[in-house]
Image (cartoon, rainbow, N blue to C red):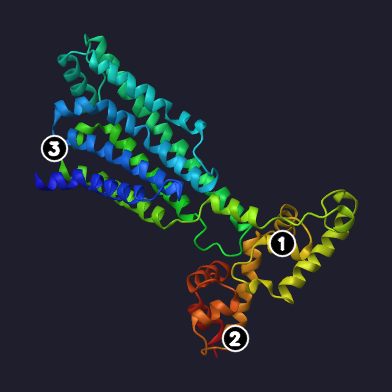
Amino acid sequence: MILEKIIVFTPIYVSIFWSIVFFANHYSANKPRYFLGVFMATTAILYICHAFFFLGFKALYLKTDSLYLFSSLSVFPLYYIYVLLLTRDTSIKKIHFIHFLPAIILGFSLLVSQLISTTEDKLAYYQSALLQNNWPLAGASLSTITMSALFFTSRLIFGIQAFVYLLLGYSLAKKYNYRIANFYSNLEGRELVWVKLLSITFLITALASIVANIAGRGSFMHHNWLLAIPSLVFSTLLFTIGLLGNKQNFTVKGLEADKENEAETILEEKENVYCTTNLLNRTQQRNETLKREVLKLLKEKKIYLNPELKITEMCKMLSTNRTYLSGFINQEFELSFNELINSYRVHQAVSILKTNNNDLTLNDIAIASGFGSVSSLNRVFKNHTGSTISHYKQKHINTP
């Protein structure tokens, strides 16, 4: 019995812990993090209702069944809006609430159905739909059929939400990472790779949840080891979301603020040889000129040694605008701004390794190459060369 309670309550503890942590932040200070607290609080409500069911509190669960339905259909929309606030929208908008219409409509409908149903009708619904995952037997009352229909409809919508919202979240994170890669040379603390990986993990977990729904919650009632599996998986996932969300300080709001602060230099056509107006007339000549100037900044002036270099700073040096330069780099070098700058930083790091074999620490190399930290150096170096610095030295430098 004690083991069963530990298994059932673990996701609740995790959700409540993180909701308290995130609600401690003021809403205006970090809207995504505060909204993640709403996600965690809703998840806690969901698992509290779960606990009523799996601990056998039949009467209490039936009173909260509509709340369970509402919270279960709100989890994925809440997660999606959290990702929206990280990657695209700087504030909550009215249109966001349209995502909660299924939860509101079905949750309210189930609540009304249960309020007008008799005890016998609710017990029949509990036994057939909730425990056995079956459609009510022939001769069941209209109330029992209605409640069952709402329950099975909610499970279908839950499955659709799992695919749609997690794929949308993955896409948002991918587009956001592309945007910042074309603005910042240093992505440390800004990139949202974890959101993409988490979305994939969340999707796999959701599939497991859908399979469990198909099998029926009743199949877990007398098998603690079966119940332990989804409980452990969801607890781990929730803790991971909370941990990574708590570390994520940079959002699209920071990106938009940096764009405003780093005002683009917009010159008249006669003063700007790279002006996009009438671009078709002398495209090739201008591109060749711009490429020479870009390479001069990188090879001769070594602007990549500035760890916080932004594309707007390069724009000012070249008297061009961000949109044009970003597109030019993408097309001409087939790289993002971040990838282009980091390629020179890695080349610099390799040169330092060859000339100062064992004299410098990794921190020295990171600073001398334009990286903001050792972790950034290690990550980028491996992405570009396919090996760690130590392995690279052993293979290419230390080899007699």
Report, in whole angstroms, how far the alpha carbon at label 1 lies from the one at label 2: 26 Å
Q: Give, as a three-letter code, the residue at label 1.
A: Phe
Residue bearing mark 2: 354
Q: Is residue 316 left or right of residue 340?
A: right
Residue in the image at 82% along x and 55% along y? 267
Give the CA separation, mark 2 to mark 3: 65 Å
Question: Residue 308 occupies which quadrant of the picture?
Answer: bottom right
Q: Of label 1 and label 2, which has the lower sequence position?
A: 1
Q: Quadrant of residue 380?
A: bottom right
Position above or below: 207 against 182: above
Mark earlier in primary sequence (2, 3): 3
The picture places residue 248, in percent across and down from the top left corner, at 45, 56
Q: Is residue 22 above or below residue 67?
A: below
Q: SS at mark 2?
A: helix
The quadrant the N terminus occupies is top left
Question: Which residue was labeled with disc 3?
Answer: 222
Q: Quadrant of the C terminus?
A: bottom right
Of tags 2 and 3, the one toward the viewer is 2
Mark yes or no: residue 132 visible.
no
Amino acid on which the number 3 mark rests in the picture: His
- Nearest the viewer among 338 and 37 is 37
Residue 333, label in figure: 1
Residue at the (84%, 64%) spot, across then down? 289
Label 3 Cα crowd, 10 Å radius (few <14 / some 14-19 / many 20+): few
